Amino acid sequence: MQYFVMQKAKELGIKVMFDGQGADEVFLGYEHYFKYIYKDLKDRAIMNEDFFENLKSFRYPKEGILEGYHGIEKFGVAWERIRQTSGVRESYLNQKEIRDIFDYQSFFSFNIRELMQNNLQALLRFEDRDSMAFG
């Protein structure tokens, strides 16, 4: 879709565009981030009981978010889950490296890591390719 947007921009003589691509990644707008948002609100004691009241999510009901939250609430839970279900021999698992991946000290550090490690490269690649296709 972005390809055609950039094509139309070229036709109209537009040189610079702000298209919103990546906003969901930057602001953690995807449903699979709900458990991290829930954890952050709970950690900062600013979450009310009505957190789920107006949540309209097709794929992740309240129970799914809570289940995911309990997997990230404490690193020990995540470590045990990885150890028991990964199929990798424990002697090959490096707890310190896994902790660096899964144990976030703050929501901000999670957001930064998610953006820098998982999203930014793909966003820039597609944006660059689509925007440069038309010079």
Image (cartoon, rainbow, N blue to C red):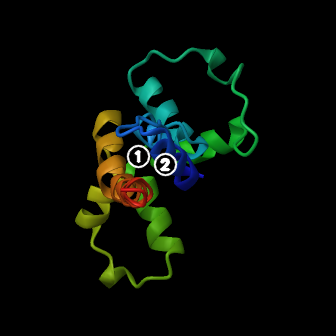
27 or 93, nearer to the observer: 27
Residue 89, given in percent of the width and then of the height, sits at 40, 85
Question: Looking at the picture, which amino acid does disc 2 mark?
Answer: Met
Residue 83 appears left or right of 70: left
Vertical arrangement, residue 118 with respect to residue 51, above or below: below
Identify the mark at residue 63; answer none if there is no mark.
Answer: none
Q: Nearer the viewer, mark 1 or mark 2?
A: 2
Q: Is residue 102 left or right of residue 100?
A: right
Which label is found at residue 6? 2
Q: Residue at x 67, y 24 (%)?
A: 52
Disc 2 on helix, strand or loop? Answer: helix
Q: Residues within 10 Å of mark 2 (few under 14, many from 20)?
A: many
Q: In terms of sequence position, does the residue under pointer 1 or pointer 2 come before the other?
A: 2
Residue sitting nearer the eye, 98 or 30: 30
Q: Is residue 59 left or right of residue 92?
A: right
Numbered mark located on residue 74 in the image: 1
At 34% across and 43% down in the image, what residue appears? 110
Determine whether label 1 and label 2 are within 8 Å by CB. Answer: no
Give the residue at x 71% y 20%. Answer: 54
* Quarter occupied by residue 126: bottom left
